[in-house]
Image (spheres, grey):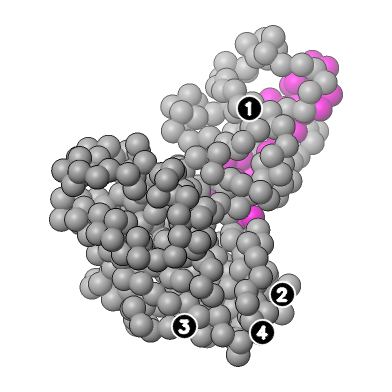
Amino acid sequence: MSTKMTTKELAKKVVNHEETFILDVRNTDEFDDWKIEGGKVEVINEPYFNLLDGIDPVADKLNKDQEIIVVCAKGGSSQMIAEMMEEEGFTNVYDLEGGMKAWSEHLEPVKLGDLKDGGSLYQFVRLGKGCLSYFIASNGEAAIVDSNRMIDNYETFAEEKGVKIKHLIDTHLHADHISGGRQLAEKVGGTYHLPPKDADEVTFDYAALEEGNDIIVGNTTVNVQPIYSPGHTIGSTSLIIDDQFLLTGDILFVKSIGRPDLAGKADDWVGDLRNTLYSRYKELSDDLTVLPAHYSFAEELGEGGSVSARLGNLYNQNEGLQVDDENAFRKMVTENLPPQPNAYQEIRETNMGKINPENEKKREMETGPNRCAVQG
């Protein structure tokens, strides 16, 4: 029997920047589209069917005593290959339990810091998809921003911290992952907040996330102040927490900027995107810590696995913020776009409440990498 490694165990290795070696046995096209990444992750791909007659195709690339984690789509093929390797004398082989399917759903909570009035802010890092969500805890209450659909993770965390979830906030209508905000709000009796300009077609009630509508979390004042910042969607709204943290949604990332085309409106929205990045954010304090809703590159994972950057530093380092010519900017964000996220239209309709797929279908819809950024 092969030795299993859980996604939690692998996540700890990735966020702690430990040397990690992965043998991915999925088909090459699947591997090229999406794989496990991290600062010190080395990964090689050899399709499962090439190894059915023996592990010779990879044997000369591996040391028999090194730690090797075998990964496949769902965990079956990796178990078989790991057992074959053990029979050939490899002594430190694991197969990833649940494969890439499970990896896609793992959420790793990372503490970002304490808030001024006794609260705390946490970032939930979805390593398999690059999604980032936020958990604000203060005096027995909590708010969650841009939650993923795996809501059990947030409920368990709230229980551990002894807080009651009161507010669920989406900075915009997501197109690359299914939001858990509305479902979790219904389950815990909380309020679901969504920008009204992104809510024209939704089928449910929500509280309007609008500039000036502060959201109070706990008796101590953790103020979440929306700033209307269109560009990625027409309703995209940023949040300032405790005068320290700027939650930018999918407008601004550490290494890139948001793409304006996921509702088919790239040409219409590129001006809004530029105005938000080059005017509205410029008026804010350089010392704000930018906390985006996604990351695209393994090198964005910092200490403990968190993803963040000082706003002033991004204006010096992020190429998307340094295009002075308006036409050059327009060209960059309309011509440099990666492929659309898998099933993005179905995901948008799910987040609008228009369709409600089965859980297995939701998993399938979300398969693949984050594609919310413009590629430089």
Residue that badge 1 annotates: 42
> Whole-Å distance between the Cαs marked 2 and 3?
20 Å
- At x 65%, y 33%, the residue is 40
Left or right of 280, for residue 270: left
Q: Is residue 28 magenta?
A: no
Local SS, label 1: strand
Local SS, label 3: strand
* Crowd class of label 4 (few under 14; some 14 to 19; many from 20; radius 10 Å): some
Residue 81 falls in which quadrant of the image?
A: top right
Q: Earlier in the sequence, mark 4 or mark 1?
A: 1
Percent position of residue 157, x then y: 67, 69
- The amino acid marked with disc number 3 is Ile
How much space separates mark 1 and mark 2, taking CA atoms?
35 Å
Q: Nearer the viewer, residue 332 or 277?
A: 277
Q: For mark 4, what is the residue?
A: 140
Extreme-bottom residue of the structure = 219
> Mark 2 = which residue?
161
| Magenta span of residues | 80-108
Quarter of the image with the N terminus is: top right
Residue linked to disc 3: 215
| In front: label 2 or label 3 | 3
Q: Name the amino acid type tagged 1.
A: Glu
- Say which label, 4 or 3, has the lower sequence index: 4
